[in-house]
Amino acid sequence: MFDKFQSIFRIPELKRRILFTILILVVYRLGGHVPTPGVNGEALAAFFQGKESTLFGLYDMFSGGSLKNCTIFAMGIMPYINASIILQLLGAVIPYFQKLQKEGEEGRKKITQYTRYGTVLLGLIQAYGVSFFVESLRSELGPVVPNPGLGFRLLTMITLTCGTVFVMWLGEQITDRGIGNGISLIIFIGIVARFPTDVLATIRSIQLGALEIFNAAWLLILIVGVIAGVIIMTQGMRKIPVQYAKRVVGRKMYGGQNTHIPLRVNTAGVIPIIFAQSLIMFPGTLASFARGNVTMEKISLLFSPGGLTYSIMYGLIIIFFTYFYTAIVLNPTDLAENIQKYGGFVPGIRAGRKTAEYIDRVLMRITFPGAIFLALVAILPDVLISRFHAPFYFGGTSILIVVGVALDTLQQIESHLLMRHYEGFMRKGKIKGRRFY
């Protein structure tokens, strides 16, 4: 394995791409420590204590901890992700965007352009919301914004939106000139940067006796097992065989080949968990601003992580969004039409509507275990905290993103190695990458 990693740096282009990617990620992490003007960082950090299970904790994870410190990258890449998801959903209901999705490279360029415009628009809206929200915060250390007003809001809007656009540009530079998907790697490095703190917190808990060594050993075994399960589910797929009839055009013969349609067990990726977390955390987030209200406190208790009601509703919402998003991103009718248009057919299935029904039936069946697995992985952090008293938040969105992005990056590195006649990371088969969105 060490020789295989050495082979990476024997290829000049691959070496240059990896070093460029590392440089961009370093720039991103450095920018995550530049504070937003006019904000009392200590008072803001005091407010965010204990908010990990609310929407603020979810948003802070995607920004790599920048929201908690209110840096220039406080919004991270979330406006870009939101704009991308909105355009994907519009592609399912608006004919114009459906047409762009089918136009190949030119259509993708147009969608990318609209995504950038949407990122700026959503960035301005969210930045205004952040400025207004931060102004209203107070902690035991005093107000978070000592000098509120229109000037602070305008400055915050410009600063945070420019920060988001700069992060988007960094991600695109990695995709074009580096290795891996840039946007995914930006989120990946923000999550991984918290791991050293979690490890130190675990060691400190063992030393203080808060976490028993026996429980820590079981916790480690469980974590390794979950990571292995996520890898298996991420790479798991059902291959539907497709045959293409031979065609003679002029003096050339086309077709006559066998291929397959890869239907992934987890087609929706991590998006269902993001949607479900946003919904399930919303009542608790509202309740945190209504201290003393009996009704809101009951709602907060009902939707508090670790409870039976919370876990059941959280799992059901994830299963629903898994099927919903799978139906959005993968249309069996379009697949069947494309197969028929190029003279292909699924053996034993009539072309056209019957093929679409067959693909839809297979997709619904293989999506079910994927949806159940997503729900179990999402509920895992609450189990670890309540059963093993884990001093860190492991599972759900973070583990799926980390594993998915790591596999995708390793797959691209392996492709460079195999293209230049080097041996890949695996002796049998290839690593199948998976981007998180």
Image (cartoon, rainbow, N blue to C red):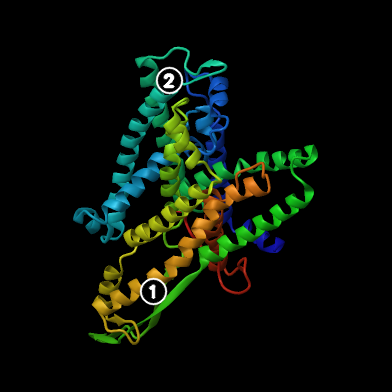
The disc labelled 2 sits on which kind of residue? Ser
- In the image, residue 361 sits, relative to residue 138, either above or below, namely below
Q: Residue 300: which numbered mark, if any?
A: none
Query: How many labels sit on residues?
Result: 2
Residue type at tag 1: Val
The picture places residue 315, in percent across and down from the top left corner, at 47, 54
Side (left or right) of 106 relative to 415:
left
Viewed as shown, does residue 420 lie left or right of 111?
right
Q: Look at the picture and state if 239 lies above or below 180.
A: below
Q: Nearer the viewer, residue 332 or 9?
A: 332
Determine the CA span between mark 1 and mark 2.
Answer: 51 Å
- Report the quarter where the N terminus lies: bottom right
Disc 1 and disc 2 in contact, CB within 8 angstroms? no
Q: Position of residue 109 (x, y in %)?
A: 31, 51
Residue at 28% over, 85% down: 252
Depicted 198 relative to depicted 18: above or below: above
Q: Determine the residue positioned at 50% across, 45% down.
A: 187
Relative depth, front residue between 269 and 426: 269
Q: Which residue does the numbered mark 1 point to in the structure image?
A: 362
Front residue of 260/10: it is 260
> In screen coordinates, is 7 left or right of 95?
right
Q: Is residue 103 left or right of residue 410?
A: left
**Residue reaching furthest front?**
294
Q: Which residue is mark 2?
A: 136
| Earlier-in-chain disc, 1 versus 2 | 2
Q: Count residues near mark 2 (Cα–Cα under 10 Å), then give few for <14, some for 14-19, many for 20+.
A: few
Give the image location of residue 233, x and y in percent.
Answer: 53, 64
Determine the residue positioned at 32% across, 59% down. Answer: 328
